[in-house]
Image (spheres, rainbow, N blue to C red):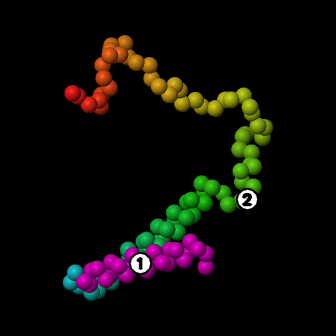
């Protein structure tokens, strides 16, 4: 059993057991409480497995994945044709008075 499936099993047992225990402690009917706990526990385990599979698509597990060439031509380009976010600071508007305090400044 992989660590992911083990963690999903633990999550399902913890979520299901805690919801069943809390429901019974609060005095709800036993049958609906058990069904609700089992369904929620199953959903918690499935959510963990699905998140693990989705995370594998973000970072490949191949040890040499960082060496892969992702360009369309197969050549590495050093021309700097990347997207630029633009200037980090916007120029002040024409009607701004440089003597005005900042918007969050404390007032005397």
How far apart in space, not on screen, are marks 1 and 2 (Cα)?
34 Å
The residue that disc 2 covers is 63
Q: As displayed, is residue 88 above or below residue 2?
A: above
The disc, 1 or 2, on the residue closer to the chain's N-terminal end is: 1
Is residue 101 toward the left or the right of residue 1 in the image? Answer: left
In the image as oriented, which residue stretches furthest toward the front? 108
99 or 12: nearer the eye?
A: 99
| Predominant SS along the magenta part | helix
Residue 98 x/y as whole percent: 35, 16
Q: x, y percentage for residue 54?
A: 55, 60
Name which residue lies at 40% across and 18% down. 92
Instruction: Indicate whether residue 19 is drawn in magenta.
Output: yes
Viewport quadrant of the N terminus: bottom right
What residue is pinned by disc 1?
A: 14
Magenta residues, as a range?
1-25
Residue 42: x and y in percent read 43, 75
Instruction: Determine the image quadrant of residue 31.
Output: bottom left
């Amino acid at each position: 059993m992989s660590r992911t499936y083990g963690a999903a099993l633990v999550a399902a047992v913890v979520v299901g057991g805690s919801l069943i225990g809390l429901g019974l402690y609060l005095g709800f009917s036993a049958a609906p409480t058990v069904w609700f706990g089992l369904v929620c526990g199953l959903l918690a385990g499935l959510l963990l497995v699905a998140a693990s599979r989705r995370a594998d698509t973000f970072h490949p597990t191949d040890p040499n994945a960082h060496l892969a060439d992702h360009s369309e031509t197969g050549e590495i380009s050093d021309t700097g044709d990347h997207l630029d976010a633009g200037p980090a600071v916007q120029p002040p508007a024409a009607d701004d008075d440089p003597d005005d305090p900042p918007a969050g400044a404390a007032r005397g």
